[in-house]
Image (tube, rainbow, N blue to C red):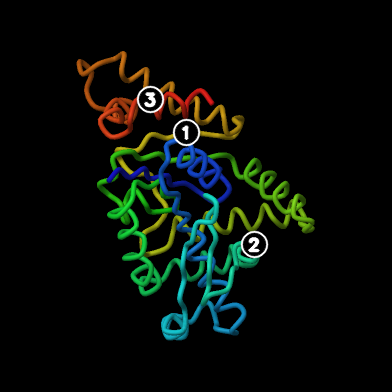
């Protein structure tokens, strides 16, 4: 099985890029953030204090999270209920950040994530995929963007769903989420040493996909004469990703 790991801060475009890559390569897309959001949603609705690890850990016994794919689209089920839209609310994003800092929650979801990569070719995105969940992933990408640009993207998402959000308030939430993710004791957000970093601040989806393909082909041209680097890491992708599939993904 082949695993592509995409890590980075909230709003960098991980889900969009991961979904596009999975679709174009014929892989399964695994949105790990949706799993943590589901637990955050459950705790919020059940009145479980998000700062109380004992209470959150106890609540896990009442939680069953599933990822299902309907016509190629991932749906998130929480105890049999489709919560794919509800988990995208701003307050649930912060709740997810709180519960994801707990080792008991991460352990609860770890096997589900790892088993999917053992059973399928996957594109998996999150905060610690390339460093903790799938440290042996054949392909690792660290996708980032400025906090302001990530806030603008969140604003656009909410407006498209008819939700109201204040830019300054949302920017504060983005910065808070970054601080929580980078400074948590368990599996903090960080770039894997062998990951390729891409800044998507001024790029759309197709431009990011093109940049990934361009880096890969640049590495192919450089050959093996150069010392290994994050860019030459892409040179090995052809060993794991069918060449024709990748070329289609790069040029669609």
Instruction: Name which residue lies at 54% across and 56% down.
Output: 70
Q: Is residue 112 above or below residue 8?
A: below
What residue appears at the point 40 percent right and 29 percent down from the top-left corner?
A: 245
Of tags 2 and 1, the one toward the viewer is 2
Residue matched to label 1: 198
Residue ID for mark 2 = 85
Q: Residue 108's x, y, as percent? A: 36, 72
Closer to the chain start, of discs 2 and 1, is: 2
Would you identify the image quadrant in which residue 106 lies? bottom left
Residue shown at the point (66%, 63%) measured from the top left: 89
- Camera-side residue: 104 or 77? 77
Helix, strand, or loop for circle 3? helix
Q: Are marks 2 and 1 in contact (CB under 8 Å)?
A: no
Residue 244's disc number: 3
Q: Is residue 204 left or right of residue 111?
A: right
The spot of residue 161 in percent (x, y) is: 75, 55
Q: Between residues 68 and 193, which one lies in front from this camera angle? A: 68
Question: Residue at coordinates 59% horizontally, 34% vertically from top-left?
Answer: 201
Identify the element where label 1 is drawn. Answer: strand
The residues bearing labels 1 and 3 have C-alpha atoms spaced at a distance of 23 Å
Up the image or down, 117 lies above or below 210; here it is below
Instruction: Give the mark toward the camera: 1 or 3.
Output: 3
């Amino acid at each position: 099985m082949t695993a592509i790991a995409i890590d980075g801060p909230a709003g960098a475009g991980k889900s969009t890029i991961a979904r596009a890559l999975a679709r174009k390569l014929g892989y399964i897309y695994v949105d790990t953030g949706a799993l943590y959001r589901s637990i955050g949603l459950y705790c919020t609705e059940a009145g479980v204090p998000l700062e109380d690890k004992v209470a959150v850990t106890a609540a896990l016994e009442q939680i069953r999270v599933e990822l299902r794919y309907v016509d190629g689209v991932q749906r998130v089920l929480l105890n049999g209920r489709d919560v794919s839209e509800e988990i995208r609310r701003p307050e649930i994003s912060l709740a997810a950040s709180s519960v994801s800092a707990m080792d008991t929650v991460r352990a609860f979801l770890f096997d589900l994530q790892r088993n999917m990569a053992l059973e399928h070719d996957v594109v998996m995105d999150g905060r610690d995929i390339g460093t903790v969940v799938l440290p042996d992933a054949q392909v690792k990408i660290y996708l980032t963007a400025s906090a302001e640009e990530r806030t603008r993207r969140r604003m656009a998402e909410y407006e498209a769903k008819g939700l109201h959000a204040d830019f300054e308030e949302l920017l504060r939430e983005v910065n808070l989420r970054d601080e929580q993710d980078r400074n948590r004791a368990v599996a903090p957000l960080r770039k894997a040493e062998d990951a390729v970093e891409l800044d998507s601040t001024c790029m759309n989806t197709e431009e990011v996909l093109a940049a990934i393909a361009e880096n890969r082909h640049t590495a192919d041209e450089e050959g093996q004469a150069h010392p290994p680097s994050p860019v030459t890491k892409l040179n090995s992708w052809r060993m794991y990703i069918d060449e024709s599939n990748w070329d289609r993904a790069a040029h669609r």
